[in-house]
Image (tube, grey):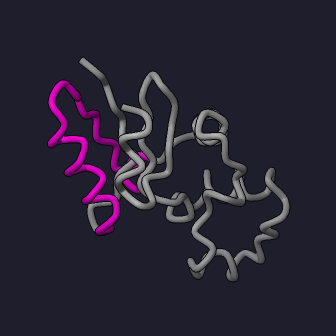
Amino acid sequence: MTKATIWHNPRCSKSRAALAILEGTPGVEVELVEYLKTPPSRPEIETVLARAGVRPSQAVRKGEGVVKDIGLDLTDDEAVLDAMAQHPILIERAIVITDKGAVIARPPERVSEIL
């Protein structure tokens, strides 16, 4: 049995598609984390992004109004991590984590890379 944790936003079609792939894969136990309701801590975000092999600036939703509202410097990874922890809407979705690593499921089919 493979355990997969998904940082999920039910309002996002890509996140719903990634969840459907996980739920439709035999032998996968899914832990659903609605990260807007129960946001991950800054250290959790940093650890997961490191496991995914991406810099914070590669995992931030650049089009969110919060980026402009707070004047976020997207070249400053420390500032981006702080902003993601304070404003979880900035975290790209969905992120799937397994024992094999983590992936930003965009496109959703990327989930298969870590199953």
Residue 13 picture location, percent across and down:
29, 68
Q: Residue furthest top?
A: 1
Q: Nearer the viewer, residue 97 or 66?
A: 97
Residue 94 picture location, percent across and down:
41, 54
Q: Total number of numbered labels?
A: 0
Task: Give me the residue at 25% from left, 49% from top.
Answer: 19
Horizontal relation, residue 38 to residue 102: left or right: left
Up-down relation of residue 49 to residue 82 (above or below):
above
Task: Give me the residue at 27% from left, 61% from top.
Answer: 10
Horizontal relation, residue 90 to residue 55: left or right: left
Q: Nearer the viewer, residue 30 or 40?
A: 30
Q: Is residue 17 magenta?
A: yes
Magenta region: 12-38
Task: Give me the residue at 52% from left, 60% from top.
Answer: 92
Residue 23 picture location, percent across and down:
17, 41
Horizontal relation, residue 75 to residue 112: left or right: right
Say which quarter of the image contains residue 77: bottom right
Up-down relation of residue 78 to residue 12 (above or below):
above
Look at the image and tell me in which quarter the C terminus lies. top left
Task: Give me the residue at 25% from left, 59% from top.
Answer: 16
Say which quarter of the image contains residue 51: top right
Residue 99 picture location, percent across and down:
45, 22
Q: Is residue 99 magenta?
A: no
Q: Nearer the viewer, residue 78 or 4?
A: 4
Look at the image and tell me in which quarter the N terminus lies. top left
Up-down relation of residue 2 to residue 52 (above or below):
above
